[in-house]
Image (spheres, helix red, strand yellow):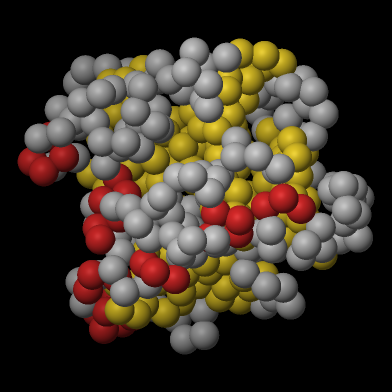
Amino acid sequence: MTVAELNQRFGAPGRIVFLSGFAGYPNAVLANKYGSAEVALLGANTLSYRPTGLGPVLFRPAKSDADYNRGDKFHGGIPICWPQFGNRFSRDLPQHGFASKLVFEVRGTEYSEDITELTLGLTSSGETKTVWPHDFDLEVKVSVSMKLNLTLTTTNTGEKPLAFSCGFHPYFLLRNRADATVRGLDGCACTDGTTPDLKRSVWTGDLKLDFAPDHIFEMKPSPKHAYAILDSGLRRAIAVASGGNDCAVVWNPGAETKLSDLAADDWKKFVCVEPVSDWPSGRTLAPGAKHVLAAAVQAHLEDVGPHGDAGVKMV
């Protein structure tokens, strides 16, 4: 559908607007009294989130604004990783799967006084079956309320079981990585992806971002998990709650990793704290079964001290 057709069918003045996005594909802008978010139909990537009265919460590389490149080589926003997170589940699939490279259809929009919501969908096709021979339905919901809310629902629409893994890959904006801390991982078993042998240990305390982490944390059994990114440079705390994930990944590329869409110092400006389901072995869905991965993001201005101290409530 064209931008004009999307606005006529799904738009709402001042609340839901479709506009021309990367590579000629539309983006959707959601807004209400609590804030705004922009979502690319290409890849269902939430490109930006800005609560009312606060600055941007998500990092977005300026060098990619002119060339989204079908979702490849884009390090910003909240990309969708599906049907695998990373590349250890299946060497036959691209890194982080293929959903971020495909165009989602708009299935619906809704709004009320307190929420503005967009529903996107992707179904199996001849194109997807060239890389992954399964029937599926993938649905992404993004809403702006007092929080930014995301759900990723996988449904096995085929007649055989299918195995997959998935994740959200949010890039949270920082003033300077060295002044930030991740809280909520104390006591979790941890795999250090920066070591050749994937060293395992149990993490103790907060994670101070004075190095380039690539750590996979095994979450303690719970229907909901909570983390916080404390940024003393911006004097801001970002609370993240997730469900449907059994892992959380904390990642930053550091100065040595060169990524084509990042400027020289961009690595200092973000950290990824990623809710991940079933890394690395995946989970199996029976025919007709569903899996829901959910995340909610809420930012607060806090009295964050030089060591990441803050009275943030993780909800």
Q: How many marks?
A: 0
Q: In x, y percent, where is residue 31?
A: 56, 75
Q: Residue at x 42, y 79 (%)?
A: 17
Q: In x, y percent, where is residue 290?
A: 40, 30
Apparent side of residue 196 relative to residue 115 in the rendered image (left or right): left
Apparent side of residue 228 relative to residue 82 in the rendered image (left or right): right
Vertical position of residue 114 compared to residue 288: above or below: below
Query: Which quarter of the figure has residue 144?
Result: bottom right
**Which of the pair 174/212 is nearer the observer?**
212
Q: Residue at x 52, y 85 (%)?
A: 14
Vertical position of residue 275 compared to residue 99: above or below: above
Q: Residue furthest bottom?
A: 13
Apparent side of residue 234 relative to residue 29 in the rendered image (left or right): right
Query: Which quarter of the figure has residue 56?
Result: bottom right
Image quadrant where one finds the C terminus:
top right
**Which of the pair 315/264 is nearer the observer?**
264
Q: In x, y percent, where is residue 166?
A: 42, 33
Vertical position of residue 306 compared to residue 233: above or below: above
Q: Residue furthest front?
A: 256
Q: In x, y percent, where is residue 291?
A: 44, 30
Q: Residue at x 70, y 43 (%)?
A: 209
* Res 280 seen here: yes
Q: Residue at x 38, y 60 (%)?
A: 261
Image quadrant where one finds the N terminus:
bottom left
* Res 108 seen here: no
